[in-house]
């Protein structure tokens, strides 16, 4: 099993993300590098847009904290990277991301 850690500066706070993946004896170093680069890009933002106060748990269809729909909040953990990227893009386009600068 290989381990790599990515440290990212996101809005002035540092976070370390350590990921583990199984080595395949047939995989090339380039494949491993691609995996690291992919995770590095995604580490530039938090794991989810959750703002820590979810109004969907109080019956709202769209969360007042993060702007995600109930279905997006509920299914976030099983979303693919592409599905998550689409949600992030929608939130950004709508100006719903709360970014501290």
Image (tube, rainbow, N blue to C red):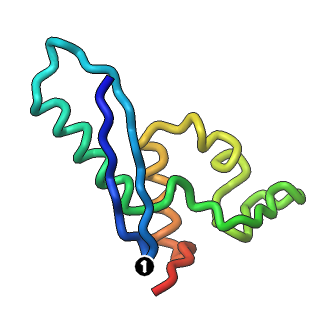
Does 97 sit left or right of 72 as displayed?
Answer: left
Q: Is residue 31 above or below residue 61?
A: above
On the image, the x and y values in percent for residue 2 come to: 29, 28
Q: Is residue 97 above or below residue 49?
A: below
Q: Give the residue at the far top of this rendering.
A: 25
Residue in the foreground of this view, choosing between 39 and 59: 39
Q: Give the residue at the far bottom of this rendering.
A: 101
The residue that label 1 is drawn on is 12
On the image, the x and y values in percent for residue 54 come to: 77, 61
Residue in the foreground of this view, choosing between 42 and 12: 12
On the image, the x and y values in percent for residue 21 come to: 35, 27
Residue at image coords 52%, 73%: 94
In which quadrant of the rendered image does the N terminus lie? top left
Assign a secondary structure to mark 1: loop
Q: Would you identify the image quadrant in which residue 66 lies?
A: bottom right
Residue at image coords 28%, 45%: 38
Residue in the foreground of this view, choosing between 60 and 31: 31
On the image, the x and y values in percent for residue 51 come to: 66, 67
Does 101 sit left or right of 68 as displayed?
Answer: left
In which quadrant of the rendered image does the C terminus lie? bottom left
Residue at image coords 42%, 42%: 81
Q: Is residue 19 above or below residue 90?
A: above
Does 2 sit left or right of 47 as displayed?
Answer: left
Residue at image coords 19%, 39%: 34
Q: Would you identify the image quadrant in which residue 30 lies?
A: top left
């Amino acid at each position: 099993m290989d381990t790599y850690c990515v440290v990212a500066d996101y809005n002035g706070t540092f976070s370390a993300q350590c990921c583990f993946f199984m080595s395949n004896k047939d995989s090339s170093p380039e494949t491993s590098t691609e995996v690291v680069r992919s995770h590095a890009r995604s580490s530039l933002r938090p794991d989810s847009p959750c703002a820590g106060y979810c109004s969907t748990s109080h019956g709202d269809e769209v969360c007042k904290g993060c702007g995600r729909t109930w279905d997006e909040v509920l299914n976030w953990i099983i979303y693919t990277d592409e599905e998550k990227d689409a949600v992030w893009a929608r939130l950004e386009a709508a100006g719903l991301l709360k970014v501290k600068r």
